[in-house]
Image (cartoon, rainbow, N blue to C red):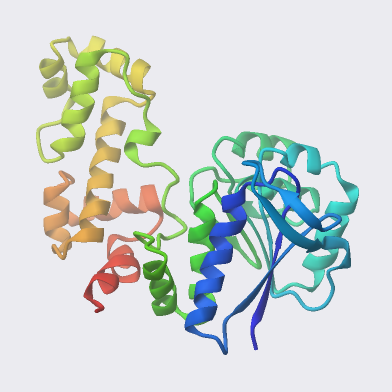
């Protein structure tokens, strides 16, 4: 029997919040037609609904949606603040969630789930730009702005926009196993089925670009040379500054201390090596500048909440070995 996926949209929704997961489930259904998915889109009032980018989709009437729903998935969009006040929309989400096996949101669609009371006393995520507001508006919701997606019981929430694809792949993996999820990812030419604990931010995204050209060059040097001496004294000398002045200026212009930036840059290098090479963990630790396997493990758990070995086994090494 197919699993019924009902995606909730509204005027001004983010098109990728709907289309990304819909294509993941649709592709899975092509591969496993007897145990796949049936995707439906519903909106208040139904009919033609315009996304925030002007593209129009035809949706069923949310108020008329009935029957068993396997997964209720709520999209996000710039107009979410308006729709949080739509009592009929929230009531329909509550009604459908009550009979669904699981509930999920993409991006700031989490606000609609929170307004429906479905996120109370749960750990959730959303787009990093909206995380602070979600936490302050809904005091009973524990908001973590870093992960790509979070599973808390039968409720799944994801970060911004394309992380909805990661969320949908995780749901497929939960239903049918990681091999099918990897095949779906391959079919959609998605580079990596990423673990939910992976951060929304790569090192360049986490740090601001320095105003000073010498510091921009130094930032690029750090990212390109993880195995070099990247201590504060060495970096300060390379920048032609005293250690104290360098630390202050670097932190001011990037938003991260030199030590923290270096660790995150090396952690990103280690992650890439795990994803695209077969190097032993000890070699990954050396090549990334982290030194030892113990440091690699500790840093990887801190940044992505998964061990280096699990990351490689679950998400990329198998994918590269398969024909």
Residue at x-position 90% and y-position 52%: 88
In what quadrant of the picture does the N terminus appear?
A: bottom right
Q: Position of residue 287 (x, y in %)?
A: 12, 49
17 vs 82, left or right, is: left
Residue at x-position 37% and y-position 48%: 302
Residue at x-position 45% and y-position 79%: 177
In what quadrant of the picture does the C terminus appear?
A: bottom left
Question: Quick one: 301 or 169, which is closer to the camera?
Answer: 169
Against 183, residue 307 (above or below) is: above
245 vs 86, left or right, is: left
* Res 67 visible: yes
Q: Position of residue 299 (x, y in %)?
A: 30, 48
Against 315, residue 74 (above or below) is: above
Against 320, residue 152 (above or below) is: above
Residue 297's quadrant in the figure? bottom left
Against 259, residue 178 (above or below) is: below
Q: Position of residue 43 (x, y in %)?
A: 78, 56
* Res 171 visible: no
Q: For the image shown, how many numbered marks are present on the structure?
A: 0
Q: Position of residue 310 (x, y in %)?
A: 33, 67
Question: Quick one: 18 or 285, which is closer to the camera?
Answer: 18
Residue at x-position 22% and y-position 47%: 269
């Amino acid at each position: 029997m197919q699993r019924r996926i009902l995606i909730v949209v509204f005027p001004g929704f983010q098109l990728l919040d709907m289309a990304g997961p819909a294509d993941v489930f649709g592709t899975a259904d092509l591969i496993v037609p007897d145990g796949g998915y049936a995707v439906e889109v519903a909106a208040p009032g139904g009919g033609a609904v315009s996304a925030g980018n002007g593209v129009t989709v035809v949706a069923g009437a949310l108020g008329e949606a009935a029957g068993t729903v396997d997964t209720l998935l709520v999209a996000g969009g710039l107009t979410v603040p308006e729709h949080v006040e739509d009592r009929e929309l929230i009531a329909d989400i509550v009604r459908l969630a009550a009979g669904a096996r699981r509930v999920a949101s993409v991006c700031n669609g989490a606000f609609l789930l929170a307004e429906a009371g479905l996120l109370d006393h749960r750990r959730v995520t959303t787009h990093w730009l909206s995380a602070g507001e979600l936490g302050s508006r809904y005091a009973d919701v524990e908001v973590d702005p870093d992960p790509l997606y979070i599973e808390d019981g039968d409720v799944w929430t994801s970060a911004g926009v394309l992380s909805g694809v990661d969320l949908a792949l995780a749901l497929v993996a939960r239903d049918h196993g990681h091999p099918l999820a990897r095949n779906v990812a391959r079919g959609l030419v998605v580079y990596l089925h990423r673990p939910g604990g992976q951060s929304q931010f790569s090192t360049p995204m986490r740090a601001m670009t320095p105003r000073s050209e010498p510091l921009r060059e130094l930032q690029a040097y750090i990212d390109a040379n993880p195995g070099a001496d990247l201590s504060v004294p060495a970096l300060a000398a390379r920048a032609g500054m005293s250690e104290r002045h360098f630390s202050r200026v670097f932190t001011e212009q990037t938003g991260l201390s030199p030590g923290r930036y270096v660790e995150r840059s090396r952690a990103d290098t280690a992650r890439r090596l795990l994803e695209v090479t077969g190097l032993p963990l000890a070699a990954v630790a050396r090549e990334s500048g982290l030194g030892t396997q113990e440091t690699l493990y500790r840093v990887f758990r801190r940044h992505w909440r998964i061990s280096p070995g699990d990351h490689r086994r679950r998400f990329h090494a198998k994918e590269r070995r398969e024909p």
